[in-house]
Image: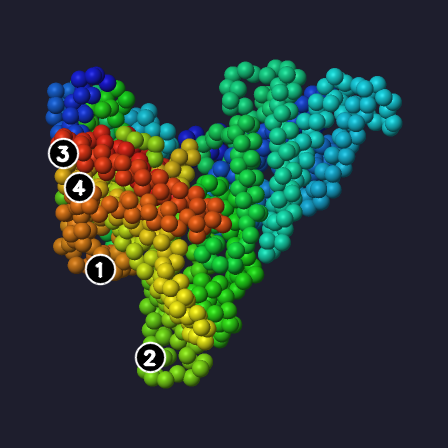
């Protein structure tokens, strides 16, 4: 529900504007050209404008409207007006072109769903005539300033000046500093624009080049940062108040901005003024953004879905902002293919450990198989959104994955259920269906586990709910491991039949009967989840910890609410509040010590380390698992000992909670 | 905040049950919304304590349609807190919604917010609501603790929900009557569009103390 009160300054953003239109603002001298008749001052002001735009740009990226941030710059709003001022003109052009590129990536990928202010740009001069040639103009300006810098350096070292070049501004003591400050700012814009363009290229073809530009961006940003000292010292009239909030390196207020101006135009702005990021924070933002983009560009375009999922989950741990996430999604899904390269059916057959030859099978034309492909694409897209949105969407698609499983199973029965013997091709179809069905279940449990674990990252659980959450995670992981193992056994069974003639079949059996490391990895998680469930339950049963009554409902209602979406999709089957109570009511410390799950987890983690020596991320995770297991071993011992001596033990339980969270965030 | 009231509040917390009357809160008088003369008091409090802008229409929308869900807290004739709520059908559920809850700073920590909000929730429950929802800033520890004690869960996180860029939690309280309703579980997974008609838009979204 929404109500707007016109002419109320709190509700009607139009009323707080100083000017009625851009033209009126310009007529009143809000954005003079040249900015100053004093050339030195003109250069100073231009740098201030550049810095303030950078702060605006970062603020925009962090979720505010374009109209209230970057396009609060009056110079940007009138593209042709700046043409007499080559420096400002080139900068404005590259800014508009950059904004346009960013808006198009984000709206194409729709990663912004919940940050919808981001792409709203109607009514803004997002594309001035000739903005596409922004780099030519930028290069020309850069060239001129480079010459001016060379000339100035030659003069100070008393060399003869080779060419007669007019300096940037008359104060020769400041010439070098200003030239350098401008050059790094211009070059940053150039390389940043290149980064965005390269990353947009299909099938990840531009990633290699993008990395080079990212490196250049980083070094230019460092120079921009360093120029701050010079600009502060050379500026007159710097206001000392709120130095942390300043949006320019010099500390001066920039000329030519009016954030309230657009509120009268068509572009939507929220009713109140926003706080811009400071110049320093904006620089930090761009360094983080570039780092995130670098991670994407260094990715090896792993053809296995499992690898892709692991990469995305790992990438999300650094909490990348919208722009980086949009670029990741753009890379992953193009034209309905993985990386715009691998057809989804190929990706699915690979994930379901089917032989290479099945990837072109006609079965992919089956309606439900096609739908499954769409679900995989949706999943990839969802995994690129922000954690809050991601969790909600994952909760919803669980139902879709459950439904597609049922539909595929029905289809399978319909086509092959009643035929006793199959032709060769039918045999292959049966096999494809079988593998895919198991894989769909496995994938569904993977989504469920991600859904639950994201709940910890988003701080949705309170300590008195941890026990039921770990219990649920335990149940989901057991199913996940079971399905994954079944899929692997099924495929190795096929492989075995093929290589039947080999003499060393006995050895094969030995190898095959060994549990694969990826399953043991899951088992390690399972042990921890089970151990934590029972430890928390024992704390409650024996020491009355974490058992506060609620005024209006009970634990049962909390269980229903937290796991509603999982329960609706029967994930896992036959799981209810009653079964949770049954498995935790009798948890006690003596039995926990006897079956020490944390020790099991430690042992498993140690055992499988060697299998992942090529995978630094997994190794790091294993180390963390081992650590958490160790901490909980200690915690369990301490609690048991103290439990005997004391009845109440409130302070201890904090430590346990902290370690348990760290486990699930892994 | 007086030290004595802190220790009393803490004592209540440890028992896990909210007791409404103690030495300091016995002087607090809770009054159901009684008409137009209460409106300026509510508006004054909300304007003073919450940053989000509300129009007179917003207040009237709530207090005219659901006067029995709004309460004011008085201390020696001075209005020190208020709660404004609504209820209605929401995708096959009858649900209550807490829109604004304010207690002025010097009076916080005395259980007044709990006193106000439990009165509204009680009416909602008696009117047949199945659940109650609201949004609170993730940084508002006081509000989160208060609602947590009542049985609210953090159902979801809303990314940068407030204009100041802070995330919100959607808090939900489910009343224990669902086993009696065989038609449940209902379809509750469509309520992600938080800008839907009967919800406050982010601009209007209140903060909870």
Residue B160 on image: x %, y %: 41, 38
Q: Is residue A176 above or below residue A282?
A: above
Q: Dot 4 lies on which element?
A: helix
| Mark 2 / mark 1, whichever is N-terminal | 2
Residue at 72% across, 38% down: A138
Q: Nearer the viewer, residue A652 or A388?
A: A652
Q: Are marks 4 and 3 in contact (CB under 8 Å)?
A: no
Q: CA distance from mark 2 to mark 1?
A: 26 Å
Q: Are marks 4 and 2 on the same chain?
A: yes
Residue marked by disc 4: A589
Q: CA distance from mark 3 to mark 2?
A: 60 Å
Q: Are marks 4 and 2 in contact (CB under 8 Å)?
A: no
Placement of the N terminus of chain A among the 4 image quadrants: top left
- Report in which chain the residue with disc 3 lies: A
Where is residue A33? Give x, y as percent.
70, 28
Residue under label 1, please give it.
A574
Q: Secondary structure at mark 3?
A: helix
Q: Residue A446 appears in which quarter of the rendering?
A: bottom left
* Gap in angstroms between the C-alphas marked 4 and 3: 10 Å
Which residue is identified by label 3?
A644
Q: Are marks 2 and 1 in contact (CB under 8 Å)?
A: no
The residue at 67%/23% (across/down) is: A44
User: Do tags 2 and 1 sit on the same chain?
Assistant: yes
Badge 2 is on which residue? Answer: A417
């Amino acid at each position: 529900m929404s109500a707007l009160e016109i002419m109320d300054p709190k509700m009607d953003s139009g009323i707080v504007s100083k000017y009625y239109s851009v033209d009126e603002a310009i007529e009143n001298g809000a954005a003079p050209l040249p900015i100053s008749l004093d050339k030195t001052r003109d250069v100073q002001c231009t740098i201030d404008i550049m810095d303030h735009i950078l702060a605006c740009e970062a603020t925009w990226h962090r979720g505010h409207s374009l109209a209230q941030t970057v396009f609060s710059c009056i110079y940007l709003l009138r593209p042709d007006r700046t043409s007499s001022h080559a420096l400002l003109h080139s900068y404005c052009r590259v800014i508009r072109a950059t904004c346009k590129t960013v808006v198009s990536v984000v709206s194409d990928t729709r990663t912004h769903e919940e940050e919808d202010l981001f792409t709203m740009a109607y009514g803004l001069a997002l594309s001035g005539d000739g903005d596409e040639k922004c780099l030519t103009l930028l290069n020309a300006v850069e060239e001129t300033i480079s010459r001016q810098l060379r000339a100035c350096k030659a003069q100070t070292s008393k060399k003869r000046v080779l060419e007669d070049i007019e300096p940037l501004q008359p104060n020769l003591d400041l010439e070098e500093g200003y030239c350098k400050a401008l050059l790094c700012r211009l070059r940053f814009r150039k390389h940043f624009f290149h980064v965005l363009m390269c990353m947009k290229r299909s099938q990840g073809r531009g990633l290699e080049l993008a990395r080079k530009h990212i490196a250049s961006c980083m070094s230019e940003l460092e120079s921009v940062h360093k120029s701050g000292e010079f600009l502060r010292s050379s500026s007159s009239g710097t206001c000392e108040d709120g130095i942390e909030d300043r949006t320019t390196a010099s500390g001066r207020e920039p000329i030519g901005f009016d954030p309230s101006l657009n509120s009268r135009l068509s572009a939507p702005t929220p009713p109140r003024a926003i706080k811009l990021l400071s110049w320093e924070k904006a620089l930090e933002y761009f360094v983080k953004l570039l780092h995130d983009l670098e991670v994407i560009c260094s990715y090896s375009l792993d053809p296995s879905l499992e690898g892709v999922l692991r990469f995305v989950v790992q990438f999300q741990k650094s909490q990348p902002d919208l722009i980086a996430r949009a670029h990741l999604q753009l890379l992953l899904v193009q034209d309905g293919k993985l990386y715009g390269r691998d057809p989804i059916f190929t990706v699915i057959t690979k994930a379901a450990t089917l032989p290479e030859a099945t990837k072109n099978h006609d079965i992919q034309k089956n309606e439900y198989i096609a739908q499954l492909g769409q679900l995989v694409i949706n999943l990839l897209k969802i995994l690129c959104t922000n954690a809050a949105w991601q969790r909600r969407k994952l909760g919803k698609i669980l139902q879709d994955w459950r439904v597609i499983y049922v539909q595929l199973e029905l289809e399978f029965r319909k086509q092959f259920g009643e035929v006793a013997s199959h032709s060769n091709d039918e045999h292959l179809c049966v096999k494809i269906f079988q593998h895919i069905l198991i894989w769909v279940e496995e994938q569904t449990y993977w989504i469920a586990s991600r859904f639950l674990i994201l709940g910890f990252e988003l701080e949705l659980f309170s300590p008195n709910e941890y026990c039921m959450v770990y219990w649920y995670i335990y149940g989901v992981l057991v199913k996940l491991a079971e399905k994954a193992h079944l899929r692997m056994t099924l495929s190795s069974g096929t492989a075995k039949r093929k290589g039947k003639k080999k003499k060393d079949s006995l050895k094969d059996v030995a190898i095959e009967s060994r549990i694969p490391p990826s399953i043991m990895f899951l088992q390690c998680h399972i042990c921890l989840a089970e151990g934590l469930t029972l430890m928390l339950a024992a704390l409650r049963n024996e020491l009355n910890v974490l058992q506060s009554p609620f005024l209006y409902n009970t634990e049962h209602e909390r269980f229903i609410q937290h796991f509603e979406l999982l329960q609706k999709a029967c994930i896992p089957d036959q799981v209810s509040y009653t079964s949770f109570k049954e498995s935790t009511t009798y948890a006690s410390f003596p039995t926990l010590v006897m079956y020490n799950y944390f020790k099991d987890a430690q042992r498993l983690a140690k055992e499988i380390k060697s299998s992942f020596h090529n995978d630094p991320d997994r190794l790091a995770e294993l180390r963390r698992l081992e650590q958490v297991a160790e901490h909980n071993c200690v915690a369990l011992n301490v609690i048991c000992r103290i439990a005997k001596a004391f009845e109440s033990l409130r302070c201890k339980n904090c430590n346990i909670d902290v370690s348990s969270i760290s486990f699930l965030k892994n | 905040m007086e030290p004595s009231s802190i220790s009393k509040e803490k004592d209540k917390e440890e028992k896990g049950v909210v007791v409404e009357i103690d030495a300091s809160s016995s002087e607090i008088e809770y009054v159901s919304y009684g008409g137009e003369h209460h409106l300026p008091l509510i508006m004054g409090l909300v304007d003073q304590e919450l940053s989000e802008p509300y129009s007179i229409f917003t207040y009237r929308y709530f207090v005219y349609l659901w006067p029995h869900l709004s309460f004011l807290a008085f201390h020696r004739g001075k209005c020190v807190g208020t709660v404004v709520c609504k209820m209605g059908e929401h995708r096959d559920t009858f649900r209550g919604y807490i829109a604004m809850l304010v207690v002025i700073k010097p009076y916080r920590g005395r259980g007044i917010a709990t006193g106000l909000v439990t009165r509204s929730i009680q009416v909602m429950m008696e009117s047949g609501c199945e659940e109650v929802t609201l949004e609170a800033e993730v940084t508002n520890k006081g509000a989160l603790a208060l609602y947590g004690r009542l049985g609210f869960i953090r159902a979801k996180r809303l990314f940068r929900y407030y204009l100041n860029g802070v995330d919100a939690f959607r808090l939900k309280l489910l009343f224990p009557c669902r086993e009696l309703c065989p038609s449940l579980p209902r379809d509750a997974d469509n309520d992600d569009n938080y800008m839907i008609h009967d919800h406050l838009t982010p601009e209007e979204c209140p903060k909870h103390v």
